[in-house]
Image (spheres, helix red, strand yellow):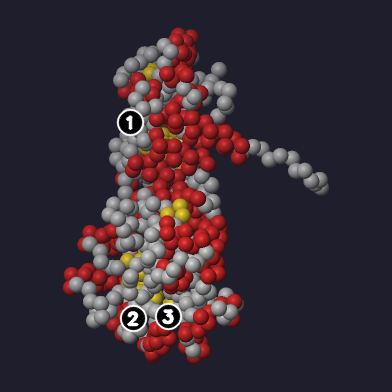
Amino acid sequence: MNWPSIVCPHNPSLFRTFTGLTVVVRVPHSAQAAEAAAQLLESGNELLCVIVESGSPFDEIDLPADLQSIPLAVMTPALGKFRHLVRSISRLRDFNLRVYLPAHNPQNIAGLRILSSLGIHTCAVLGNGPKDWEALTDLMTYAVLGRAPHASMEPFVFIASNYDPHAYLEWGSLYFNDPRRFLHVDADGRVALSPAELRQKRFVASSWAKIGTSSLSLTIQQRVQKWRQFFANNHPCASCSGWKICLGKFASEMNKNGGCRAFFLEMSEVCQQYKEQNKPAMKPHIWQL
Amino acid sequence: MAGAVAGTFLSWENMIYVADFLKAAGERHVSLLGGEPTLHPECVDFILYLLERDFEVTVFTNGILSHARLEEFRRHLTEVHPGRLNLVCNLNHPGQTPSTPKETKKILRFLAIMGPWVTLGFNIYRPDFALDFLFDVINRFGLKRHLRLGIAHPIPGQKTGFVRPEDMRQVAERLYAYRPYFDGLRISPGLDCGFPICQFTDEELGWLHRFKSPVIFGCQPALDISPDMSIYHCFPFSQYLRKSLFEFDSLRQVEEHFIQVKKQIKTEIPGIYPECDGCQAQEDGVCSGGGLCQILNRFIWEEPIRISEIEHELAKYRLSP
């Protein structure tokens, strides 16, 4: 069995308590990212990526050249001014970087498109607040079907690439929010199942050493199958045409205006189109040498 | 980019769409027009974005910029190579069409700061135009050594001042009279669309063809895109046969559409002079017989005798009298 990766804060003493694991390190400032990556590797673990959880707009985050080879997930609340960002765009294209922007306002929705069109990989953070689903539909269409060359924009490209009309699709791992793939550990080694539960200090194990135990595996299993509750409770999401992609992630919005329903319905159509476009090339009809 | 109606600004999404659309067609050049494009709150960011997408950018401006906007230009655009960014500033003659002192002050400040990026433009709207002051401005502020000359065209349906076909020869003569200035100061003239070739003598044509930029006596679709993503043949046609850019899959389709529009109009009247019908230069594609807007403008003030497509469009945009 593959154990989930550990997502933990930058803490060298914590790193030294485990070995041979795949780890995601969280740092609050980009200035700590290189050091965090180096210390994690020194501890005998494998680095999946460094998450920079910054409160500053992206144009104010300094990403020095020594971060170029480090896989980075930069989580930032806003793009900032393009005129400031433009100076570093060509340099950032060579980084192993994905920029996470909350897609809850028009500026950020535009920001995601700007970055993607300039070759910077992005991820739209679809939180629980109110969203302009129509604008998100346009963004998703651009991300998946846009013919002009652009960098990937998640979660849309992941969903389109992995879409199967006959199966459920879980894409929480893009946000490190899937306990089958990621477990969140605090500085004391306590384990939570999601980033939100880590923030709320809702731990499921007192030590990372419990990872792999049958009790924690059972807890993870129960969490993964939590969607079943939608059917047990006869929730409108369970009968929604977008269910297979959404799995009730926006249940709170479903009762308001149902904008998510139209979005995910459109998304499934876009996925079909994407599959059609990316079908493996048919064998040529003409004979070939 | 900044529409005539306040608040109608081109969005980032639409701007990126246009950039993608042009890139797909292999275009290397984008022009930003208005209204006044520098009024767009993100004008500087748009310019930088288009440059980052590897376009050469031309911005048409009246040069009347607020202190804050001019400072943005100075801070963020003066590092751009002048070969990649061209600010076309249209000036009026200070005697014939004077600006207010406040406007003049702003224009001079703009030229003083952005000079190396600026090409002067002048719109000829009367046959007795004067260019002297432009040479002085180019030298004084170190502007690009090119003068873009346009003819004031009629906007079909609107009673605006414009150069009439019978005055074109006088315009050509007057322009040639400035040859010593152009040659002496090494400034090249650039003719915008709508000049008919037959109004220039061979000597005048020979002189015009000596410069680096080719002189074209045509009227090709400029393809203006408005903030609401309408697309039309060119500015004078902004109220005639507008289409949405989203109706087209490629720039080639757009061009083909507007070439059809042009053909439709020119089937009715080939040019601005009776001699345009059967003219060798027109058949050879060297001349368009004047501006298409000049031709269309004639339809508007006459009885509805044109082909139904034209009459239908004129009626749709209330362009019939």
Disc 1: host chain = A
> Could you tell me how far apart the alpha carbons at marks 2 and 3 are, in whole angstroms?
12 Å
Mark 2 surroundings within 10 Å by alpha-carbon count, few (fewer than 14), some (14 through 19), many (20 or more) = some
- Residue A123 horizontal/vertical position (percent): 43, 36
Toward the viewer: A55 or A280?
A280
Q: Mark 1 — residue?
A: A130
Amino acid type at image mark 2: Arg
- Residue A248 horizontal/vertical position (percent): 43, 21
Toward the viewer: A69 or B36?
B36
Q: Is mark 3 on a helix, strand or loop?
A: helix
- Residue B274 horizontal/vertical position (percent): 51, 80
On the image, which quarter does residue B263 sit in?
Answer: bottom right
Q: Residue at coordinates 36% horizontally, 75% vertically from top-left?
A: B162
Amino acid type at image mark 3: Pro
Q: What element carries label 1?
A: loop
In this rendering, is residue A193 above or below B23? above
Disc 2: host chain = B
Q: Residue at coordinates 51% horizontally, 89% vertically from top-left?
A: B202
> Could you tell me how far apart the alpha carbons at marks 1 and 3 are, in whole angstroms?
60 Å
Disc 3: host chain = B
Mark 1 surroundings within 10 Å by alpha-carbon count, few (fewer than 14), some (14 through 19), many (20 or more) = some
Q: What element carries label 2?
A: loop
Mark 3 surroundings within 10 Å by alpha-carbon count, few (fewer than 14), some (14 through 19), many (20 or more) = some
Same chain check for tags 1 and 3: no
Left or right placement of residue B217 versus residue B46 in this view: right
Amino acid type at image mark 1: Pro
Q: Residue at coordinates 41% horizontally, 16% vertically from top-left?
A: A235
Q: Mark 3 — residue?
A: B165
Toward the viewer: B251 or B158?
B158
In this rendering, is residue A222 above or below A278? above
Question: Residue B126 has which mark?
Answer: 2
